[in-house]
Image (cartoon, coloured by chain):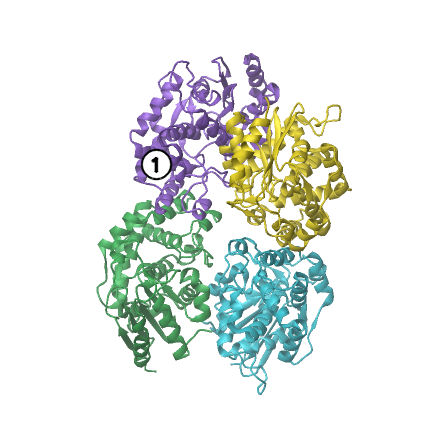
Chain colours: A cyan, B green, C purple, D yellow
């Protein structure tokens, strides 16, 4: 199937809506000054074809989409031991809530809420070289050099009181092994990775290929079993409080970030990345979700 | 693919484990006296082939699996208006919790927790003839007469203080239109339907056929769009507090009941029903979940 | 001290404010049609002097103030065994919340939230003759015949879905022994007692007399130890979510009702009853609290 | 009244129970190594008589009792503006809970839970010279030099992840003005003040004297109005989750600390300090509470 016309049509349909609704994330200056009226979409099929439309080459802050890649690294290195510190259930609460963490004694519900991603970061810090390993993985998957945006990372650190609270709260339950500042430095850096839609579609392509590297001939990124499980977590927990609704109306595993990006997977077919900075009340890209709904409707692709 | 050997092997592997672990639901005498050491499995493919093993012909109380069918009826009759009274998000809380209902002013999180199913029942009572319509639907889907177990329904009514509390609590928020007793009578009856694995696999076969009736030539049960959405709800909310874990380890939409039954769907391929009365701590059939995990592993079938 | 001028001055000061702010309880018609612009105040000293001003002879629905008297009856009959089913801590949640009840397995925080008062009613029903005994106690304390307002009781029963939910919820935890309808019938009746400020000041006079009957020569109502404990519960839990604030700004044990009445106690000195139907956001009489604050300020009476 | 025989009798009665029950606070080494088998009691009447028994001269870490004095300072300096950032209601949750703080957007329920005391510390830091002013107040009230135990303060800082989480959480809601580290430095130091029972009974003597300084002729510590309000807060919120129970069974305003000390007030009569390091499940001194109950019973003193 040639997806280029589908992407072009979605871009044409959504472009007039740019800037009309939603709010760009404003908690740090570097995100707040991103112009709202941008939209990009790119995909890569499991056999390596690519298509893109709109602002697919404009880099943005991937934010929580980075949780996909730290989780992949941690599952690869730790196997099932990872799950001693992190659950696999939807949270039913906002992504940065401390309530559940208190009731459940410092064990976060899943690796995609902030507390869970910080717990994953702690595991990676214990393994050593986490910051370098993460960039190496991202660069290898894309075939292009990927970097941290140090200005964004520094801003996150200065204003990230909620995340500092989450990390110290887990530490108070004995569920963080490393120095909280070191763990948060990794977390703030992973959120500050800059990539564009084309790069993200390629980097996450292993998720539609049962874990195989996007480039044939390379060693697998992770196992088929792990890949399926990451996709399952994306579906049940990947879009914050809207996960049920996204499963209901789009029907694909997705992981969103407050930078406005969303990665979606059609297993055995393709990986898709959409981006538009204005967010809805749940913190998901407003036009990004619309784009995914149009894509699912027009192609008939759904896991259900 | 011939699934009979797969089911036989699963039955052979699990039979020695019967009765070793888990607890049969004991809150009403009629459920408490069901012998724990039973296991049945049956499936029906989307092109009409059937296979079964173990106690697949032994009838049991379908309990919460009935929520699949009342939801189908309500979506068919009410369309999107149904969602004004019921959410579509995982609850993150036990199936009979009142906490979330209080925070969210009487709107249940999803149609598969008890409060949500009672809200669905209220909608059906408003439409009239609900009890008769439900039996007619079930009987038509199976091609066999299906009946309420009046003894079980009466026991549920006598001991169902939590459900009476849930219904009155929603009523106090103005979210139940009908007399609470009439709504609960439907709810207690739907839970008291008796069916066996073969019948349930057939009755839920429309879920793997994009909504088409199990018997070719009959009018569709519901639309493709509704069917995908029901499957999505099963995946995110169908197994109580374990939905995330079931998605993670089994990777199929499932709906369980405290009678020990679980219906699972592989879209475009088959619908499966497993049954074993002993439950795990979340209220899902212990060997039922094991059987589904074996089935998914051996066939490689997964939506992810 | 001659309190009549103090009460007259308070009445004079508050009368111009009548009807300006607050909302009369509207959940049942019989309460909703009470004219807002009324204010009464009455007190009885521990040595039997009485004073009153404003609408002190107008009867009103005592509502939750009745919880004082059922608690007194239950403590007298059951002693410390009462506390196996009911806590003694402030709830930190609205008076009709189910959240805490769920976390604490059906044991209400204290006897003054609705759940707690329903639990007290259940204990009284177990002892037999509860409705008659309660009226007999009230009539004896006042020296006048006191009656249930059957219209109000019937209205409470028809619309009391939240209380029906609370009672069934506790029953589901095995914490209500009797038939829920019988327990709620007592609860709805006790709330529907009609009395005026003079009568209530007299009926609650034992609370400023270490448990002695308002009329000298009669047997004590309850022990000094029980009396102190009831006063302590009034202070920490007697005015719903505002208990801390009332202790802070008024400094007297108080019990309020949504009919607009509030009983306050100055141990070893006097019992006071104020009434004005318009309520604040916490469900306490707006001018009633203002009157108590004026009284405390002008007399210098406070337990602190 | 001569209280010396009462204190001697309490000491004699409780001494055989020393070390039998309860746990010394163990979260920092300096507290963990305090021998459990110690008990002290001291009081000062409003006219300046003192009595003491047991280990009344042994210094201990006053911990949360310090919240009394920071609150007094803040009320004196800020008046009602203090209450814009802090509530006055019982929390209904453990002293270090974050749940309520999340629901209530960073405004702590009262100044005696940790979050509230940290919010008070933030106000004092804004006023400048907080650490010096606090020691000056304490020393002036006792008539003896009082000091911070720097070892304890440093230990609190190293292990105080929960308090660091609380402070950052409030900061994330914009409810802390100063640098979190500076605020926590004051908080950890105030908890690390070392005093004995005699000194604390004298330092808190203004609470039974309507705010007058323990030494006649000195300027008042705070106003009568403030003093009554502090006493009210002690009664409703001073002993963590047990405040209702303490009001019920002891009937006096109390403030406890995890160092094992408790200050209690009989308005217009006396201030009392008891100390014994072994704590009950709520974090209150086990024998301290028993001593207060004996004192209240034997003297008949109670505010109710």
Q: Nearer the viewer, residue B83 or C87?
A: C87
In the image, is residue A19 above or below residue A79? above
In the image, is residue C157 above or below residue C5? below
In the image, is residue C235 above or below residue A301? above
* Residue at 57%, 72% in the rendered image: A74
The kind of secondary structure element at disc 1 is helix
Q: Position of residue A212 (x, y in %)?
A: 54, 81
Q: Nearer the viewer, residue A180 or C21?
A: A180
Q: Position of residue B67 (x, y in %)?
A: 35, 59
Q: Position of residue A77 (x, y in %)?
A: 57, 75
Q: How many marks?
A: 1
Q: Position of residue B28 (x, y in %)?
A: 28, 53
Q: Residues within 10 Å of mark 1 (few under 14, many from 20)?
A: many
Q: Which residue is mark 1?
A: C122
- Which chain letter matches label 1? C
In the image, is residue D288 above or below residue A300? above
Whether residue C285 is visible:
no
Q: Nearer the viewer, residue A70 or B73?
A: A70
Q: Is residue D204 left or right of residue D235?
A: right
In the figure, residue A117 lies in which quadrant?
bottom right
In the figure, residue A48 lies in which quadrant?
bottom right
Quadrant where the N terminus of chain B is found in the figure: bottom left
Q: Residue furthest bottom?
A: A217
In the figure, residue B117 lies in which quadrant?
bottom left
Whether residue C168 is visible:
yes
């Amino acid at each position: 199937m040639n997806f280029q016309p589908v992407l072009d049509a979605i871009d044409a349909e959504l472009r007039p809506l740019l800037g009309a609704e939603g709010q760009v994330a404003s908690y740090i200056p570097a995100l707040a000054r991103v112009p709202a009226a941008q939209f990009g979409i790119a995909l890569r099929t499991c056999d390596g074809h690519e298509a893109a439309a709109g602002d697919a080459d404009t880099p943005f802050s991937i934010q929580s989409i980075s949780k996909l890649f730290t989780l992949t690294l941690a599952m690869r290195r730790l196997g099932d031991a990872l799950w001693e510190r992190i659950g696999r259930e939807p949270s039913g609460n906002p992504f940065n809530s401390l309530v559940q963490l208190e009731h459940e004694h410092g064990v976060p519900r899943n690796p995609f809420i902030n507390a869970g991603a910080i717990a994953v970061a702690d595991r990676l810090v214990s393994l050593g070289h986490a910051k370098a390993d993460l960039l190496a993985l991202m660069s290898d998957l894309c075939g292009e050099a990927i970097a941290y945006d140090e200005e964004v990372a520094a801003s996150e650190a200065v204003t990230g009181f909620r995340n500092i609270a989450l990390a110290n709260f887990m530490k108070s339950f004995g569920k963080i092994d490393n120095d909280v500042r070191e763990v948060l430095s990794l977390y703030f850096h992973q959120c500050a990775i800059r990539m564009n839609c084309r790069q993200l579609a390629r980097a996450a392509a292993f998720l539609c290929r049962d874990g195989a590297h996007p480039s044939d001939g390379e060693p697998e990124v992770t196992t088929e079993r792990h890949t399926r499980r990451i996709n399952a977590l994306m579906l049940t927990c990947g879009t914050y409080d809207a996960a049920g609704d996204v499963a209901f109306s789009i029907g694909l595993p997705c992981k969103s970030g407050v930078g406005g990006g969303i990665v979606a997977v059609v297993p055995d077919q393709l990986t898709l990345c959409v981006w538009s900075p204005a967010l809805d009340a749940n913190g998901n890209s407003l036009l990004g979700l619309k784009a995914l709904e149009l894509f699912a409707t027009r192609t008939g692709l759904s896991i259900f």
